[in-house]
Image: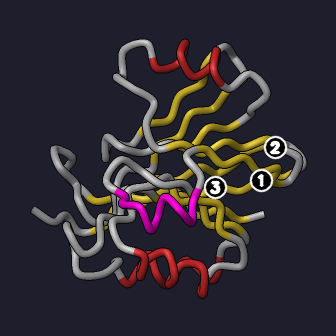
Amino acid sequence: MELLLISDTHVPARARSLPAELLDAVPRADVVVHAGDWVDSATLDLLQERSRRLVAVYGNNDGPELRARLPEVAYAELGGLRFAVVHETGPARGRERRCADRFLDTDVLVFGHSHIPWDSVADGRLRLLNPGSPTDRRREPYCTYLTARVSAAGLEDVRLHRLPGRS
């Protein structure tokens, strides 16, 4: 099962549209995961149309329309792994402990908010992934997104993809 993980798209606030490379990857994924801060409903509509399956949440920059359509936390079993998706996890310091305590029955937590890619393991069991942002690199050298594969062996081939940086 092929996964595409994104967050913090901020269209049209930070970019007019999603990067072509990212849009081309959407139909190739079995599941697209979006960890919030869409900003507009048109991007949600676009990904719903192009995705085989979309697992998504709203973020702190998403207004009433998006909050009415999306949950704050989403859960999905994908290929036997228990995923949770949330926008905010708080400061980097102490993140693993907070998330391990909050998401006890979760194998993989996908989150956003910081626009900073993150890949760590909490308590030897919970994989924490932040794909960064494909449209707003902030202090990072590149805009980014993640891909991964779920197989019988678990989560494999987690790859950070760099996109041209936008200032």
Q: Quadrant of residue 36?
A: bottom left
Residue identified by numbered label 2:
81
First of labels 1, 2 by sequence position: 2
Query: Decide: marks 1, 2 in contact (CB < 8 A)?
Result: yes
Residue identified by numbered label 3:
148
Q: Quadrant of residue 63?
A: bottom left
Q: Quadrant of residue 19?
A: bottom left
First of labels 2, 3 by sequence position: 2
The quadrant in which the N terminus is found is: bottom right
Query: Decide: marks 2, 3 in contact (CB < 8 A)?
Result: no
Is residue 49 a member of the stretch shown in magenta?
no
Q: Secondary structure at mark 3?
A: strand
Q: Amino acid at mark 1?
A: Val
* Magenta-drawn stretch, dominant element (helix, strand or loop): helix
Residue identified by numbered label 1:
150
- Residue 146 position, x and y percent, is 50, 56
Q: Amino acid at mark 3?
A: Ala
| Residue drawn at (50%, 35%) of the image | 119
| Residue drawn at (63%, 32%) of the image | 127
| Residue drawn at (24%, 75%) of the image | 12
Q: Which residues are magenta?
A: 62-70
- Residue 59 position, x and y percent, is 41, 50
Q: CA distance from mark 1 to mark 3?
A: 7 Å
Q: Nearer the viewer, mark 2 or mark 3?
A: 2
Q: CA distance from mark 1 to mark 2?
A: 8 Å
Q: Secondary structure at mark 1?
A: strand
Q: CA distance from mark 2 to mark 3?
A: 13 Å
| Category of crowding for the residue at label 1, using alpha-carbon neighbours closer than 10 angstroms: few (below 14), some (14–19), many (at least 20) | some
- Residue 86 position, x and y percent, is 54, 42
